[in-house]
Image (tube, rainbow, N blue to C red):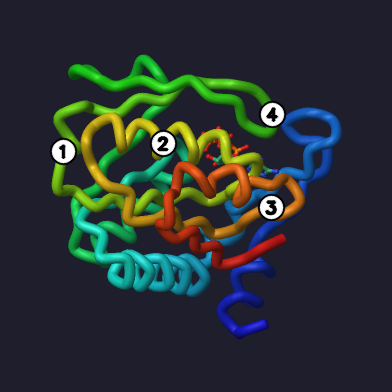
Amino acid sequence: MTDIKELLLSRIRDVADYPEPGVMFKDITPLLADPAAFTALTDALAEIAANTGATKIVGLEARGFILGAPVAVRAGLGFIPVRKAGKLPGATLSQAYDLEYGSAEIEVHAEDLAAGDRVLVIDDVLATGGTAEASIQLIRRAGADVAGLAVLMELGFLGGRARLEPSLAGAPLEALLVI
Ligand SMILES: O=P(O)(O)OC[C@H]1O[C@H](OP(=O)(O)OP(=O)(O)O)[C@H](O)[C@@H]1O
Ligand SMILES: Nc1ncnc2[nH]cnc12
């Protein structure tokens, strides 16, 4: 394992049975509290943004905001928040979905994405892929292209990568850690 992967992995805390029995929650707050680890993560994701030719960064509420916003600044790209339903004041597109522990609905301001945009989606965890899939559907419905999906960690045993294959349609899925 490379030094950066070891550093990132060492700053992720496992919390058993949170938020419900049977879930091993991957807590990134120790990583966020370590400036060296957070900077290394931001740099790695910004490099992916450059490699994919992205023109915009979408972050998925809430942890995708924490990671995606500094990446957008580092990469010199605009940041578009995909929020949980009911939080955006303008005209929105909405998508319902299921995730590892529950279900939800996400929204984006329709005016924030348009034809010609190449969007990199950023989040902390890819688990079942439900959240990421819904975000890809929103981006496409807004008329934009998906440049890729970049996550800090992929929980491989939950099969999110296979689920996303059709919606990604050849766009890359980059996971810095596969667990
Ligand atoms: O692949 P999935 O099964 O869809 O799960 C992954 C999603 O779950 C978590 O978000 P959560 O909805 O818990 O929101 P939070 O970031 O506000 O804590 C995580 O940050 C991803 O967005
Ligand atoms: N096991 C997990 N840990 C942290 N975030 C998650 N989102 C979905 N599943 C998760």
Identify the element where label 2 is drawn. Answer: helix
Please tell me how many numbered marks the rendered image carries: 4
Q: Amino acid at mark 3?
A: Leu
Identify the element where label 1 is drawn. Answer: loop
Please tell me the numbered disc located at residue 114: 1
Query: Where residue 150 sits: x, y (%)?
Result: 45, 57
Mark 3 and mark 1 in contact (Cβ < 8 Å)?
no
In the rendered view, tell whether residue 91 sits above or below residue 28.
above
Provide the residue designation for mark 4: 101
Rounded to the nearest angstrom, the CA distance separating label 4 from label 2 is 17 Å
Answer few, some or many: residues within 10 Å of disc 2's Cα (few below 14, many 20 plus, some between 14 and 19). Answer: many
Query: Where residue 26 sits: x, y (%)?
Result: 68, 49
- At a point 76% along the width and 51% down the height, the residue shown is 157
In the rendered view, tell whether residue 24 sits above or below residue 105.
below
The CB of the residue at mark 2 lies under 8 Å from ligand 1: no
- Locate residue 125 relative to residue 136 in the image: left or right: right
Query: Where residue 43 sits: x, y (%)?
Result: 38, 72
Quadrant of the drawing holding the C terminus? bottom right
20, 134: nearer the viewer: 134
Provide the residue designation for mark 3: 155
- At a point 50% along the width and 44% down the height, the residue shown is 166
The CB of the residue at mark 4 lies under 8 Å from ligand 2: yes
The earlier-in-sequence mark between 4 and 1 is: 4
- At a point 31% along the width and 36% down the height, the residue shown is 140
Provide the residue designation for mark 2: 135
The earlier-in-sequence mark between 1 and 3 is: 1
In the rendered view, tell whether residue 21 sits above or below residue 74.
above
In the rendered view, tell whether residue 14 sits above or below residue 129.
below
Query: Viewer-nearest of labels 1 and 3?
Result: 1
Rounded to the nearest angstrom, the CA distance separating label 1 from label 3 is 31 Å
